[in-house]
Image (spheres, rainbow, N blue to C red):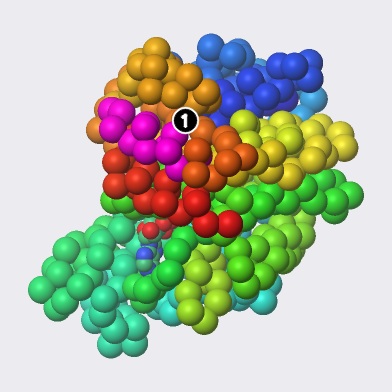
Amino acid sequence: VGVLGAGQLGRMLALAGAPLGITCRFLDPSESTCAAAFGEHVSSEYDDSGAIERFCGEVDVATFEFENVPAETARAVGERIPMRPGAESLERTQDRLSERAFVRDAGARVAAHARVDDADSLDAAISEIGLPALLKTRRFGYDGKGQVLLHEPSDVDAGRQLAGRQPCILEAFVEFEREVSIIVVRAEDGACATFPMTENLHAGGILRASIAPAADSGGTGDEARRIGETIAERLGHIGALCVELFETARGLLVNEIAPRVHNSGHWTIDGARASQFENHLRAVCGWPLGPSEAIAPSVMLNLIGEAPAASDILSADPAARVHLYGKSARPGRKLGHLTVVDEDREALARRVRALAGLPGVHRESALAAAERATVS
Ligand code: AMP
């Protein structure tokens, strides 16, 4: 399987593929990547046709683990070998404005938003949407990057600077009750393996902790599943796709579609019967999908900026599942994650609390996740 991108998602795809006899080859412009330890790395810019040719040789099928891969690269690969998902999934989701139009067409709701083409059109957008609001770049935003929160008129200068550099959207600030996500893996024949809805805790725009299955008293999980499966079908998507949602008093709003395996699905490696990574590979290879049910309640904690030694994690909880990505430490960088899986919700919460003080774990999010994990 050829993989465009070679970060931790590529690494976890390769790890999931190994027992199935799948070998991965990666194309990524970085010189050293954390996936390269588990597959051949073609180190090149995405638009180098010679490198694309080398990448495709002996590869049966290609996929991507990074949604900002140029759609032209996906098309160039797709002319040589099957590309799953196709360039359509990338193109629809790379631009926040067209992504939101697509979501509405698919019958789901998004937050009120307005187009901001330059600094001068920001004022008109503010009169339409009101404050507080988030100004987001249309392209290349992730983990809260390329976003400015506008609380009051005095913040508008920072917004004008961002809008002067890149096309943006201004989006109403959503007073959500919680953030959830749904991961759907769709096969070529339209069959879906959909994982239980996950609850996600963010700080500073970055995912810190996930709780799965998310507590669900009012059929929200079913609604999230419908939204995710409809979006996957409308895209003609093959492989994994994540829809990030805000749960509000008036129902679910779609925040973002990630047309790939996703951080909020990392718990599935240890907490589901067949993980998002394995199911993604099965889908792109045209194989039957595996079961997506949760084995037991799980909490995933991201290790960001710094990562403890595995031995320190295991001293805090010998049963914690440790995933270190082999990346060098840098502020804000995702360096690994931990998953705690436990049938007993009180024990799950206790174990998560015992990990909350580790370096790289966001303490408040971990304590909040422990609390949330006791609710079914
Ligand atoms: P994004 O990069 O758009 O996924 O945003 C990162 C995080 O910022 C989200 O997970 C939310 O926690 C927060 N966020 C994004 N958009 C909004 C919004 N319209 N209202 C409130 N919070 C938001």
Q: Nearer the viewer, residue 356 or 248?
A: 356
Q: Is residue 146 magenta?
A: no
Answer above or below: position of 158 versus 299: below
Taking the image as shown, residue 40 lies to the left or right of residue 370, namely right
From where the camera sits, is residue 7 visible?
Answer: no
Q: Residue at x 81, y 37 (%)?
A: 290
From where the camera sits, is residue 21 visible?
Answer: yes
The residue indicated by pointer 1 is 338
Which span of residues is magenta-colored? 348-359
Q: Residue at x 33, y 21 (%)?
A: 308
How many numbered markers are drawn? Answer: 1
Q: Residues within 10 Å of mark 1 (few under 14, many from 20)?
A: many
Q: Name the outermost residue toward the bottom.
A: 127
Could you say where residue 56 lies in the image, as x and y percent from the top left?
Answer: 70, 23
Q: Nearer the viewer, residue 103 or 312?
A: 312
Answer above or below: position of 43 versus 8: above
Taking the image as shown, residue 22 lies to the left or right of residue 353, namely right
Q: Amino acid at mark 1?
A: Leu
Q: Nearer the viewer, residue 260 or 265?
A: 265
